[in-house]
Amino acid sequence: MEGFFAKTFRSGLQPVELAKRVLREMDSGKTVGVREVWAPNHFEITLSPIDRERFEQVELSLIAELKQVVRDGAAERGWGLAGPPEVEFSTDDKLGKGEFRVTSSLVEGEPEPPRAQIGIARPAATRAFLAFEDANGRKEFPIEKDTVTIGRLPASDITVSDPGASRSHAEVRAVDGGYELVDLGSTNGTTVNGHRIREHPLEDGDRITIGRTVIDFRTA
């Protein structure tokens, strides 16, 4: 949880503190079932009024990040989840700046499909790729996975050497027979065809701008 969050919250309560508490709640609240260990999947995070106000503008992005923390934490530890991760925020006027509570519970629901299966319903004939030019010329990247990461990190599926790009900037995800672009709370934002987006369904010919890098989305 870096990049945008680290720059936005340089003092006071940090999102990484929430992530660590969520993982502790998963550990302390896990239940041993017949065949596996079940960890809590629903979390209510209660903040002070001042911290809730500070987080308000990025609350949806923060919720998405914390849900991924739950998924990754369960997968790394071999725990099961009774349903999809759920994270919600509330406010308690009695809490002071920097104080917060996390309450966890197991809430049954439809299990999420494994990431490798997300988007499996898209037609087999549908092909898509991303392309952009840098100092080394034009590069094309076929989208061969259900989640393709874009950012400055060398571990990204598509590494963009652009100072305006965050380390983990955005993802292209296969959904509902097509693809969508999701900004991962980047510092400078992501635009499609000149419009700033948080989530955006992609169509052939869309132009994605990250920093000064323009990436073409094409299907065949």
Image (cartoon, rainbow, N blue to C red):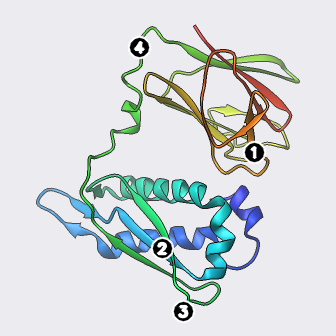
Mark 1, residues whose alpha carbon is within 10 Å: few (<14), some, or many (≥20)? many
**Nearest the eye: 64 or 77:** 64
- Find residue 94 and name its label: 3
Gap in angstroms between the C-alphas marked 3 and 2 = 14 Å
- What residue is rendered at 49% in x and 27% in y? 145
Gap in angstroms between the C-alphas marked 2 and 4 = 40 Å
- Which one is earlier in the sequence, the residue at label 4 or at label 1? 4
Residue 8 location, quadrant: bottom right
Residue 218 drawn above or below residue 99: above
Mark 3 vs mark 4: in front: 3
Q: Find numbered disc 4 in the image and state the secondary structure of the residue it sits on.
A: loop
Mark 3 vs mark 2: in front: 3
Gap in angstroms between the C-alphas marked 4 and 1 = 31 Å
Mark 4 — residue?
123
- What residue is rendered at 64% in x and 68% in y? 55
Q: Quadrant of the C terminus?
A: top right
Number of marks in picture: 4
Q: Position of residue 41 (x, y in %)?
A: 34, 61
**Residue occupying the far left of the picture:** 34
Gap in angstroms between the C-alphas marked 1 and 2 = 26 Å
- Which one is earlier in the sequence, the residue at label 3 or at label 1? 3
Three-letter amino acid code of the residue under disc 2: Ile
